[in-house]
Each structure stands twice: as C-alpha cells, then as structure tokens.
Image: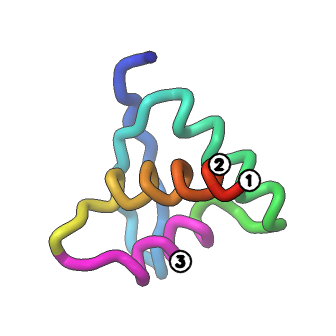
Amino acid sequence: MSRPVKHSLTLRGHRTSVSLEDEFWQAFREIAREKSMTINVLAAEIDAGRGTETGLASAIRLYVLRRYRSG
C-alpha cells in the first residue's frame, strides 16, 4: 500500500485537503464515475453523513470499503 497523498477538494464552496492512499483515491474516483458524480460532490455527500467524531479521510475510506464489500 502506498503512503497517503494529499488532494484538495471543494465541499459546498469550501476548499479542504484530504490525505488518502493512492489505492483509495483510485477506488473513490471509480465509485464517483459509476455514480456519474464528481469526487467533490461525492465527498460532500459523505461529509454530510459523517459524525463529528469521524474525520473526512476516514469517512471516505469507510465508504469505499463498504461499497466494495457490498458488491
């Protein structure tokens, strides 16, 4: 597995940085493409559904994991 790579995202008009391993970035982009969404829109959706105890990067990783586990 690779080291985390930081990318900037725009969530509801605000810029933020998220660090994910390249494998998670690739999977996240694939999921967004399958859903006909940009990664910014998908990240905003995930952000809106996460609790205050969970960081955005962790929420994205869990989203990707759940998506691939559910088939």
Q: Is residue 25 left or right of residue 30?
A: left
Residue 51 to residue 24: above or below? below
Name the image quarter holding residue 39. bottom right
Q: Secondary structure at mark 1?
A: loop
Residue drawn at (52%, 28%) of the image: 22
Q: Which is more N-terminal, label 2 or label 3? A: 3
- Magenta part, dominant SS: helix
The Cα–Cα distance between marks 2 and 1, rounded to whole angstroms, is 5 Å
Which of the two residues, 61 or 37, is positioned nearer the viewer here? 61
Residue drawn at (36%, 28%) of the image: 4
Q: Which residue is mark 2?
A: 68
Kind of residue indicated by mark 2: Tyr
Q: Is residue 41 left or right of residue 21?
A: right
Locate the N terminus and report the quarter of the image it occupies: top left
Residue 16 to residue 26: above or below? below
Q: Are marks 3 and 2 in contact (CB under 8 Å)?
A: no
Q: Which residue is mark 3?
A: 45
Q: Which residue is mark 1?
A: 71
Q: Which residues are magenta?
A: 41-52
Kind of residue indicated by mark 1: Gly
Give the percent coordinates (x, y) of residue 46: 48, 72
Q: Give the crowd class for mark 1: few <14, some 14-19, many >=20 residues within 10 Å.
A: few
Q: Is residue 48 magenta?
A: yes
Q: Give the crowd class for mark 2: few <14, some 14-19, many >=20 residues within 10 Å.
A: few
